[in-house]
C-alpha cells in the first residue's frame, strides 16, 4: 500500500456553491482526510462555478478538466444545452442560489409530494431509468463505447424530453469514464446518487474498489412518493458498491430496510464541524420578542408544514414570537397559504434563500433553531446553530441527534409535542443556556477528523 | 469494643406522568400511578421482599446480635401501602424484632433543608408522625435527604431534640480524622455519625465491578478489613441505599450470599458487634466537634449538592417550587398541599442534572427521561399546571369571602323587610 492512498472522489457540488449539506460535508471530509489521515484526493465535479478554494486536494471540472487549488477563475457560462442547464439556472447557481430556486426537474434534491406524478410523465421516467441502467449493467467494453459517445449523440433522439437532471448525470458519467479510464487511484469514492453511475461504471472499467457515501436518499426527500429513477440508481449503486458509508445510523437503517443492503457492508461516519477561526461573532440581542428559526429547503422532507402548524400552537400561548422560515422550495406557496389560513401570517416571516453571512446572522439572532425533518440523514445545520449559541429542537428522524445529545427531540408528526418544546424553550432562558453550554462542549467532540478516521478504516479494508 | 453500624436508605419518588404544556389547563394529576405502581412492585420483588426476608433470618439466627437501621421516606411508605402492602408488613415485622431502628427524615425526601426551614420542619414532623403510626416507634436519630448536611442543619436538628444526625465522612472535612468515631455537632450535645464511604462503597458500588482489584469480594475478606480497624475506631458506619441488594447489585452478583455470611464473619471476632445508630451514640463518647463549613451530601465524587442544584434549570425550578409555600399552605386544600410536597421530592431535580453528560456519560445515571432538558420541561409543565390550579382555588376563595362579607347583611336586610 502507498503511504498516501490515492482517492478519486466524485462529487456534485462544492462550497461556496451549495444547495444544502452535501457541499459542506464534502469540504469538511476531504480536508480532514487529507490533513489528518494523509489521503491524496482528486475531487471531480461536473463543473467549477468559481470561488472554490481547496488547497488540500486537487479539484477538477469534469468538462474542462480545469484543475484548481484555490480557484478564483470565472467559469465560462456556456450556451443553453451544452451543460444541460439553462442560462438562467447557471447564473442563479453562480450567484450562490444554487438549486433552491430552480425548477424541480433540474434539481438533484427536489422533493416530490406524495401522489404527484413523475415530472415529465411516466414515459420520460421509463426512458431515463432504462438509460441510466446502462451504466450499471454494461460490460467494460460497452462502457468504453458509451464513454466515447459525444455529449449529444446518445440522447439526441430523445431530445424532446428536454434538459433535466438525469441528462446532467448521464453526461457527467460519460465524462468521468472518458477522462479517468486510466486513473491510477487506489479507491473511487462517490458522493450521493448523482455520482453513483459514474462510480459504478468507472469501478467496473478500472477494477478499482468503489466506496459509496450516502449523504441523503430518495427515501428522505420523497417520502412515499418515490422517484423511481433516483431510487433505482441508488439501489443499483448501493448493491454494486464495494463498501458503503452512511452519515448516520439512521441512514444506515434506511439503506438496510428500504434498499435491502446487508448491514455488514455499511459503515457509519457522522458528519462533523470545523470551529472556523474566521467565524464572526454576533452578540445575541436582548429582544423583547423571541424568534424561532427554520432554515432549509422548503420541501416535504424538511417538514415545513409541521413547523407552521406547531408555530400556530405556540402563538396561541405566547403571542409575541416571530417564526423565521429561511429557504425556498416547491412547498413554499402552500406553506405561505397555510400560515394565512391559520391566521399567523403576520408572525411568520419568509426570508427566502440565505447565504454566507446572512445564515450566520440568522443563526445568531434566533432564540431557537428547529429542524422538524420527516427524514434527515444528518443535518449539519444543527451543528452550525449550536456553533452560534442557539439551542436546537429536532425531529427524532434526524441523524444529527445521534451525536447532539444536548438537544430536544420529538417525532416529526407530533405537532403538539413540537410546540410544547418550543414554548418551554422560549419561556425558559435557563433551559436555553444550559442546553447551549453543554452542546458547545459536545460540539468540540463532533469533529471531521473522526469522520475521516472512520472513512480511512473503510479504505484500509479495501486496499 | 468496636461496632458495625448499618443504615439502609429506602426511597421511591412519585414519578411524574408525561405532562405537556397544554395539559396545564386540562389535567390536575401530575403523577404516573401506573408507572409508580409497576416500579414499586418490581423493586419489591427484586430487592425489598427478598432482602427483608434475609435480614429477618439473620436477626433470628444471631439472636439479637445482628442489628440494622433504616430510613424510609414517607413517600416510599405511602407507595408501599398502596402498591405492595406485603413490603410494608415485612418492614413492620423487622421493627418488631427490636433489632431494627427507624431513622427520621423528611417525609417527601426533599431538599427543604436548604430551601425553606419551615417546610423542613414540617416535613420532619410529618415523617415522625407517620413512623409512629406505621411502626409504633419514635425516631431519635435524623438523616437528611441524600445526607445533605452542614453546621446549620446539624444545629437545627439538635434544636428539634434529636440525639444524633448522620452525614457523609468527606475527606476535606475530616482531614486527618477518622470517620470511625462519634463526633459532635458544634455547640450542641447532638452526636454526628459519619459514613465510612470507602467501606460502604465497596458494597454499594464496587461489589460487582470486575475491574476492581478486590473482585470478587467475599464476606471473609470484607470482615477482615473491618477487623483491621480494631483499636483505631469505635464504629464503622456503613450507610447505603437499600436497593443495593438485588436492584443496583443484581442477585446474580452474589450480593445476597455476601450479606448472608457477613454477620457471622464479623461476630467471629470477639471485639466486634453490630449496633444501631442510637446504640452507637449511647455506647461511645463524642470525640470532638466537627465543623461542616460547606454543604455536603453522599452523592458521587463531588459529595456536594451539584447533582440537584448544579445548573440553572435546577436552581430555577427548585426556587419556583419552594416559593409557592405560603400560598399553598394558605389554601388549606389538603390534596393541593400534598401534591405540592410530592413535587418537592429531590429526584425530580436530580433528573435535570447535566453534569454527568459533560463526560459524554449521559446514561450512567438512572433517569426516566431521555435528557435532563426533557426532565426540566416536564417538571415545568407540571408546576405550571399546579400553579393554575392554585390560582383557580385562590380566586374561588376570594370570591367566596367577598360574598361572605356582603351576603349576611344583604340577607339580613331582605329578611327584615319580609318580616
Image: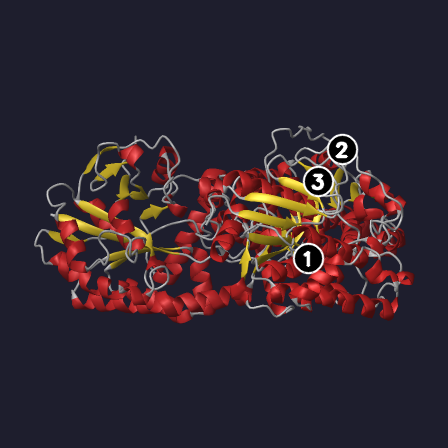
Q: CA–CA distance between discs 1 and 2?
A: 26 Å
Q: What residue is pinned by disc 1?
A: A198
Chain to which the residue tagged by mark 3 belongs: A
Q: Is residue A71 above or below residue A125?
A: above
Q: CA distance from mark 2 to mark 3?
A: 14 Å
Q: Residues within 10 Å of mark 2 (few under 14, many from 20)?
A: few
The colour scheme used here is secondary structure
On screen, A12 above or below B303?
below
Residue at x-position 31% and y-position 54%: B204
Query: If you read the primary sequence from the N terminus, does the residue marked by circle 3 or circle 1 appear first?
Result: 3
Dot 3, crowdedness within 10 Å: few (<14), some or many (≥20)? many
SS assignment at label 3: loop
Label 2: which secondary element: loop
Q: Quadrant of residue B153?
A: top left
Q: Which of the chains bears the disc numbered 2? A: A
Look at 64% across and 38% down and name the residue there: A429
Whether residue A8 sits left or right of residue A119 in the image: it is left
Q: Which residue is mark 3?
A: A15
Amino acid at each position: 500500500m502507498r503511504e498516501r492512498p490515492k482517492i478519486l472522489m466524485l462529487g456534485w457540488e462544492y462550497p461556496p456553491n451549495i444547495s444544502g449539506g452535501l457541499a459542506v460535508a464534502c469540504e469538511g471530509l476531504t480536508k480532514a482526510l487529507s490533513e489528518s489521515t494523509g489521503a491524496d484526493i482528486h475531487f471531480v465535479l461536473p463543473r467549477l462555478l468559481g470561488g472554490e478554494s481547496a488547497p488540500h486536494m486537487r479539484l477538477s471540472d469534469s468538462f474542462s478538466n480545469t484543475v484548481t487549488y484555490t480557484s478564483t477563475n470565472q467559469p465560462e457560462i456556456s450556451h443553453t444545452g451544452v451543460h444541460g442547464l439553462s442560462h438562467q439556472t447557471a447564473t442563479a447557481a453562480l450567484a450562490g442560489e444554487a438549486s433552491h430556486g430552480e425548477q424541480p426537474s433540474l434539481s438533484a434534491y427536489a422533493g416530490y409530494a406524495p401522489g404527484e406524478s413523475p415530472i415529465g410523465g411516466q414515459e420520460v421516467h421509463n426512458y431515463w431509468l432504462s438509460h441510466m441502467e446502462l451504466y450499471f449493467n454494461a460490460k467494460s467494453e460497452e462502457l468504453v463505447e458509451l464513454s466515447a459517445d459525444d455529449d449529444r449523440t446518445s440522447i439526441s433522439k430523445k431530445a424532446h424530453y428536454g434538459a433535466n437532471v438525469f441528462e446532467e448525470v448521464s453526461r457527467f458519467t460519460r465524462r468521468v469514464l472518458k477522462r479517468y479510464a486510466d486513473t491510477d487511484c487506489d479507491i473511487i469514492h462517490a458522493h450521493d446518487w448523482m455520482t453513483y453511475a459514474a462510480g459504478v461504471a468507472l469501478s467496473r472499467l478500472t477494477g478499482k474498489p468503489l466506496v459509496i457515501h450516502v449523504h441523503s436518499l430518495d427515501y428522505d426527500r420523497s417520502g412515499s412518493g418515490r422517484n423511481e429513477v433516483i431510487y433505482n440508481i441508488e439501489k443499483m449503486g448501493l448493491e454494486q458498491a464495494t463498501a458503503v458509508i452512511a452519515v448516520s445510523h439512521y441512514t444506515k437503517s434506511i439503506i438496510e430496510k428500504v434498499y435491502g443492503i446487508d448491514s455488514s457492508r455499511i459503515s457509519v461516519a457522522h458528519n462533523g464541524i470545523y470551529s472556523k477561526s474566521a467565524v464572526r461573532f454576533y452578540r445575541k440581542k436582548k429582544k423583547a420578542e423571541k424568534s424561532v428559526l427554520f432554515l432549509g429547503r422548503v420541501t416535504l422532507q424538511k417538514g415545513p408544514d409541521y413547523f407552521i402548524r406547531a408555530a400556530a400552537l405556540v402563538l396561541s400561548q405566547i403571542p409575541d414570537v416571530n417564526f423565521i422560515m429561511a429557504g425556498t422550495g416547491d412547498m413554499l406557496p402552500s406553506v405561505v397559504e397555510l400560515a394565512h389560513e391559520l391566521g399567523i401570517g403576520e408572525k411568520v416571516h419568509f426570508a427566502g434563500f440565505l447565504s454566507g453571512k446572512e445564515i450566520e446572522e440568522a443563526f445568531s439572532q434566533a432564540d431557537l433553531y428547529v429542524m422538524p425533518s420527516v427524514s434527515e440523514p444528518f443535518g449539519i445545520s444543527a451543528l452550525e446553530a449550536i456553533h452560534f449559541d442557539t439551542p436546537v429542537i429536532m425531529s427524532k428522524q434526524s441523524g444529527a441527534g445521534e451525536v447532539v445529545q444536548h438537544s430536544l427531540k420529538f417525532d416529526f408528526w407530533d405537532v403538539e409535542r413540537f410546540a410544547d418544546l418550543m414554548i418551554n424553550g422560549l419561556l425558559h432562558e435557563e433551559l436555553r443556556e444550559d442546553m447551549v453550554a453543554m452542546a458547545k462542549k459536545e460540539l468540540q467532540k463532533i469533529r471531521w477528523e473522526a469522520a475521516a478516521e472512520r472513512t480511512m478504516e473503510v479504505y484500509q479494508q479495501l486496499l | 469494643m468496636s461496632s458495625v453500624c448499618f443504615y439502609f436508605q429506602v426511597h421511591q419518588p412519585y414519578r411524574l406522568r408525561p405532562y405537556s404544556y397544554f395539559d396545564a389547563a386540562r389535567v390536575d394529576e401530575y403523577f404516573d400511578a401506573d408507572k409508580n405502581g409497576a416500579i414499586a412492585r418490581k423493586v419489591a420483588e427484586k430487592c425489598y421482599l427478598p432482602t427483608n426476608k434475609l435480614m429477618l433470618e439473620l436477626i433470628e439466627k444471631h439472636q439479637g446480635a445482628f442489628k440494622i437501621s433504616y430510613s424510609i421516606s414517607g413517600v416510599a411508605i405511602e407507595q408501599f401501602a398502596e402498591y405492595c402492602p406485603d413490603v410494608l408488613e415485612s418492614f413492620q415485622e423487622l421493627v418488631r424484632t427490636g433489632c431494627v431502628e427507624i431513622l427520621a427524615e423528611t417525609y417527601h425526601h426533599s431538599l427543604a433543608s436548604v430551601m425553606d426551614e419551615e417546610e423542613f420542619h414540617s416535613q420532619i414532623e410529618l415523617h415522625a408522625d407517620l413512623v409512629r403510626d406505621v411502626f409504633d416507634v419514635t425516631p431519635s436519630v435524623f438523616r437528611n435527604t441524600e445526607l445533605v448536611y452542614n453546621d446549620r442543619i446539624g444545629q437545627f436538628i439538635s434544636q428539634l431534640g434529636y440525639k444524633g444526625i448522620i452525614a457523609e465522612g468527606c475527606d476535606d472535612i475530616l482531614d486527618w480524622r477518622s470517620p470511625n468515631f462519634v463526633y459532635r455537632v458544634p455547640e450542641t450535645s447532638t452526636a454526628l455519625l459519619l459514613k465510612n464511604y470507602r467501606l460502604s462503597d465497596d458494597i454499594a458500588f464496587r461489589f460487582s465491578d470486575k475491574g476492581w482489584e478486590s473482585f470478587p469480594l467475599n464476606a471473609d475478606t470484607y470482615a477482615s478489613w473491618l477487623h483491621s480497624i480494631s483499636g483505631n475506631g469505635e464504629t464503622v458506619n456503613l450507610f447505603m441505599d437499600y436497593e443495593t441488594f438485588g436492584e443496583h447489585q443484581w442477585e446474580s452478583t452474589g450480593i445476597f450470599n455476601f450479606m448472608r455470611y457477613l454477620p457471622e464473619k464479623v461476630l467471629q471476632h470477639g471485639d466486634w458487634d453490630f449496633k444501631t445508630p442510637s446504640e452507637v451514640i449511647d455506647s461511645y463518647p463524642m470525640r470532638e466537634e466537627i465543623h461542616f463549613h460547606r454543604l455536603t451530601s453522599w452523592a458521587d465524587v463531588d459529595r456536594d449538592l451539584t447533582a440537584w442544584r448544579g445548573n440553572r434549570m435546577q436552581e430555577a425550578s427548585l426556587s419556583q417550587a419552594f416559593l409557592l409555600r405560603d400560598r399553598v399552605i394558605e389554601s388549606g386544600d389538603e390534596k393541593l398541599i400534598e401534591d405540592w410536597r410530592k413535587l418537592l421530592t429531590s429526584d425530580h431535580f436530580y433528573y435535570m442534572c447535566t453534569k454527568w453528560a459533560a463526560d459524554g456519560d449521559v446514561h450512567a445515571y438512572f433517569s426516566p427521561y431521555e435528557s435532563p432538558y426533557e426532565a426540566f420541561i416536564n417538571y415545568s409543565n407540571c408546576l405550571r399546571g399546579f400553579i393554575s390550579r392554585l390560582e383557580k382555588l385562590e380566586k374561588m376563595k376570594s370570591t367566596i369571602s367577598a360574598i361572605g362579607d356582603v351576603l349576611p347583611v344583604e340577607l339580613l336586610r331582605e329578611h327584615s323587610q319580609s318580616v
